[in-house]
Image (cartoon, rainbow, N blue to C red):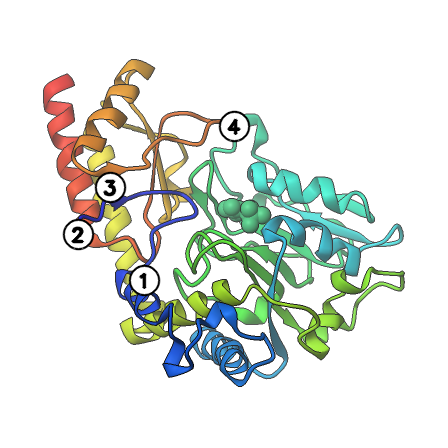
Amino acid sequence: MKRIHNFSAGPATLPLSVLEKAQKELVNYRDKGASIIEMSHRSPEYTEINEQAAERLKRITGADDDWEILFLQGGASTQFMMAPQNFLNSERTADYIDTGSWSSKAIKEARLFGNVHIPFSSKETNYSKVPEDHELNHSENPVYTFFTSNNTIFGTQYPKEPATNGSLLVCDTSSDFLSRPIDLDKYGLIFAGAQKNLGPAGVTVVMIRKSFLENQVQRDIPTILNYYTHIEKLFNTPPVFAVYMVNYVLEWVEEKGGLSYFETFNTEKAELLYSEIDKDDFYRGTVEKASRSKMNVTFRLPGEDLEKAFIAQAAEYDLAALKGHRSVGGIRASIYNACELDSVKALVKFMQDFRKNNG
Ligand SMILES: *Cc1c(COP(=O)(O)O)cnc(C)c1O
């Protein structure tokens, strides 16, 4: 069986061991004579999976009992409106740091529910950086500060959490969740679409602090969009297959050594690629060095024809999904947790050969 070197930004590569485990039990889950996706979401089998996934996530992130873990639908994009609907109104202001397309989409939704203040935007420089703390102009008393920890499209990532004006953070961490340790004390709400670093599409992991939820606004919120609904009980059918897969990915994360293991591993992979990019000016990184992402490595070549040739020839070596996002062009190598070191080494080797032949 041939597996490509998969640099897809999302849905993205998953650990082979997890895929094989799912394959093995797909038709007959634990001798029940049915697949896990053919059983009730209230069955003991699925209940165990849901609880196990939540427990594992708490163990991996070090979350205490103030934290609730929810497996919701609608993608990270639904959290763009669900968070402000629960916490923002016309008397309140939230700070939203604008570092790319996903932040902008979150800002657009938040404005439907209340006041949005933008402490920093890198839009003018085509989102080539994330802010340093001294560049942030906070509002007086924000109800929360929103940021996108990793900007999947532009290839930037916060090296650490941004400073706030005393508020807790609300974070879209869709493309770097569980890629490194996280200082939970700074956060009130964290969400991530699973399809980048965590599992298949279809589930959004939400971590919410009960003490933060006490700030919920007084307004009529549709039942399914109210965080309390999902904390109280399994309200409706969860995306069972996606949660089942996430549970196995979490098991794999723990077996590998947890978040500090992945921080080291992801740094090693990113450094291999960036040092190749920085060797001369054939390859050019697209963002400021201090803001470089360890998840989505973006770069350009001297001309769009060369970029096209690069992508086409790379595919001949099974180096796949390297085309930059349609809104920015160039090359993007997404190297999430499940991307193997061998894949990165194969890409570096190809970059060297391509430079030799075309530089
Ligand atoms: C992919 C992505 C999203 C969108 O996620 P959906 O699950 O498709 O709604 C949001 N934010 C970031 C940072 C992403 O990478």
Q: Nearer the viewer, residue 300 or 228?
A: 228
- The residue that label 2 is drawn on is 1
* The residue positioned farthest toward the front in the image shown: 33
Q: Secondary structure at mark 4?
A: loop
Q: Position of residue 212 (x, y in %)?
A: 71, 70
Q: Position of residue 165 (x, y in %)?
A: 68, 57
- The residue that label 1 is drawn on is 19
Q: Secondary structure at mark 3?
A: helix
Point out the tag, 4 or 3, that comes first from the N-terminus: 4
Q: Is residue 359 visible?
A: no
Q: Amino acid at mark 4?
A: Asn
Give above or below for 303 relative to 335: above
- The residue that label 4 is drawn on is 126
Mark pair 4, 3: CA separation? 22 Å
Task: Please state if 319 lies on the left or on the right of 168 as rendered.
Answer: left
Q: State the mark number for residue 280.
A: none
Point out the tag, 1 or 4, that comes first from the N-terminus: 1
Marks 1,3: beta carbons within 8 A: no
Which of the 4 image quarters holds residue 216?
bottom right
Question: How would you rate the neighbour count of disc 2 (Cα within 10 Å): few for under 14, some for 14-19, many for 20 or more?
Answer: few
Marks 1,4: beta carbons within 8 A: no
Which of the 4 image quarters holds residue 79?
bottom right
Q: Amino acid at mark 1?
A: Leu
Q: Residue visible at 78% across and 43% down?
A: 111
Point out the tag, 2 or 3, that comes first from the N-terminus: 2
Mark pair 2, 3: CA separation? 27 Å
Point out the tag, 2 or 1, that comes first from the N-terminus: 2
Q: Is residue 63 visible?
A: yes
Q: Position of residue 12 (x, y in %)?
A: 38, 49
Q: State the mark number for residue 273.
A: 3
Question: How would you rate the neighbour count of disc 1 (Cα within 10 Å): few for under 14, some for 14-19, many for 20 or more?
Answer: some
